[in-house]
Amino acid sequence: MALASVTMNFPFISTHNNYHNLSSNLTFSSLCTNNNNPSSNFSPSSLNYIHFSSSTLYSKQLTVSRNVHRQTHSTKNHKIKVICARSEPLKVMISGAPASGKGTQCELIVQKFGLVHISTGDLLRAELSAGTDIGNKAKEYMNSGRLVPDEIVTAMVTARLSREDAKEKGWLLDGYPRTLAQAESLERLNIRPDVYIVLDVPDEILIDRCVGRRLDPLTGRIYHVTNFPPDTEEIKARLITRPDDTEEKVKSRLQIYKQNAEAILPVYLNIMNKVDGNRGKDAVFEEVDSLLSRVKKEEQDANKLEKSEITSTQVDIASSSKDWRGIPTRLNNIPHSREIREYFYTDVLQATQRAVNDGKTRLKIEISIPELNPATDVYRIGTLMELIRVLALSFADDGKRVKVCVQGSMGEGALAGMPLQLAGSRKILEYMDWGDYGALGTFVNIGSIGGKEVEKQDDLFILVAPQNAVGNCIIDDMRAMTDAAGNRPVILVNPKLKDLPGSSGIMQTMGRDKRLEYAASFEICYHFRLLYYAGTQYPIMGALRMSYPYPYELYKRVDESPGKEKYIPLATFANRPSIDEMNDAFEGKSRNQEKKAVGFWGFLSGIL
């Protein structure tokens, strides 16, 4: 049978906290990639079990600009499994508020898994004691009562991570990064954990733990007046209360921790696992142990699967797109969950940001899932609008003035109108929630498509699904706009720029070659579509994905058991693969093998 491709679309997204439930057996699967960093050999991870709360997911940029507060202590949490192949040792980050039990869990993790425990406090003391350059710089700040800058702390951490024992045994970063700037520094250095563990403890419990905490100045051991009293009266007599362990100071520290944790969360959201820390240490570690053990087991299973499914004649995907978190399953389930939609928003955003940062000025996003496909009855324009909002606010957070452009009515008189896909889109954009900081009208403005819309203060333009209509062509207006924009980025989101027939059924021919040449001048920075058997939309056979600047990745969907599925990588392609190339990959043929007629597999129906 032949494969067909279908454009992906998302469901309508309310600006209110009305979230759809995420199935508990929803999975994400992909083959993660190695980061090309010879100095550190850091690479993304293998199989990660990710614990999401039922709160909405959101990007780092949205968090900053909209200051959206999401509840993270949901009683109904859903687990998402990411499947990747990893040959390197385990890399773990653990975070928790003061008195959350983080130190105890670190000791247990190191004992069980043999990871190198890295604490910034220990590193700083070691650098000071050794009198290193980093230690001396840190000492200058400490002696003057100032905080040690992030770049110095990050330098200490990266130097420790680059040592052989950390590379060979894996590492456990204890309480670091603590700020968004630190997290972003690690991201720029391609340092990313396999799992990000967050110990979740109610505030009142944390305050009680801190206020009742006592320090043995002789041994440095921590006790608690009720939960963990000392063994002897001699020890009890010399215990002291640390200056920071007063209720007022504890509340202040908790507030600072929460602010930093909320800022960091989007960076590691896809690998975050929240653990209930309001239990005994053994019960908490039982869950942590289970999590990390599953990661190691799934690594072995994934490596076996890789060997059996990927032939030696196919290109390994492992060097393609970094930080790709897998393909979400159950994409034919409508409506999609909030988590899935935000998942794709982030993937699109990251690819687009990379392209813009590399100086690309004519970009195109093609994302095709059922809820973003206007040809289906599940198309939801609100999903497209929220994707636009994520892009616009994110670039606005970077200080850019963004103009979101929706094409206006086309034609004249009785023939005037606009594509049905865009009907009402401008009003939706105007009435959407753009945050509490007045982004709309300042850093984000809404306009039409055309040269007159380009103003001197505009830094970047996002064109919402520009498309030709019957008897009318949007390309002339687009060309006028890009000419006026000059070297400023213009981003097309799900454009449809093929010529359409007029009312007489005759294609527009005058200047057609030039129009198509102009449409092709936009470089694809993100592409995702599902593949189906020809003439059907069920079952999904696989997916094709490209995220700038990495190659196209072809995945095959596999049923594991009733109700469970996953995606496995088949091949990568430097350019968009042809129908024959994808069919060959699905059949396990070498790309050098002579092509033969293969019946239904000889063609794919769909738009590629």
Image (cartoon, grey):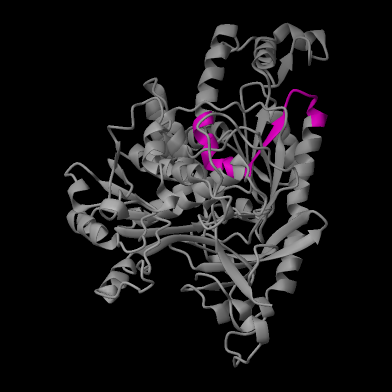
Q: Quadrant of residue 268?
A: top right
Q: Is residue 205 above or below residue 411?
A: above
> Residue 273 magenta-drawn?
yes
User: Viewed as shown, does residue 20 lie left or right of 130?
Assistant: right
Asked whether 78 or 316 is in front, the reply is 78
Residue in front for this viewpoint, 181 or 388: 388
Q: Residue at x 45, y 36 (%)?
A: 62
Q: Is residue 313 visible?
A: no
Between 495 and 261, the one nearer to me in the picture: 495
- Residue 221 lies, with reference to residue 152, above or below; the image says above
Residue at image point 34% right, 49% down: 462
Name above or below for residue 519 compared with residue 277. below
Q: Position of residue 214 (x, y in %)?
A: 68, 13
| Residue 87 placement: quadrant | bottom right
Q: Is residue 309 left or right of residue 584?
A: right
529 or 239, nearer to the observer: 529
* Residue 605 appears in view: yes
Extent of the magenta region: 262-283
Q: Position of residue 210 (x, y in %)?
A: 65, 14
Quarter of the image for the N terminus: give it: bottom right
As drawn, 44 above or below 203 = below
Find residue 139 and report its image quarter: top left
Residue 380 among those drawn in magenta: no
- The x, y position of residue 477, in whole percent, is 24, 57
Residue that appears at 54% across and 46% down: 160
Q: So how many labels did they put on this image?
A: 0
| Side (left or right) of 425 relative to 407 | right
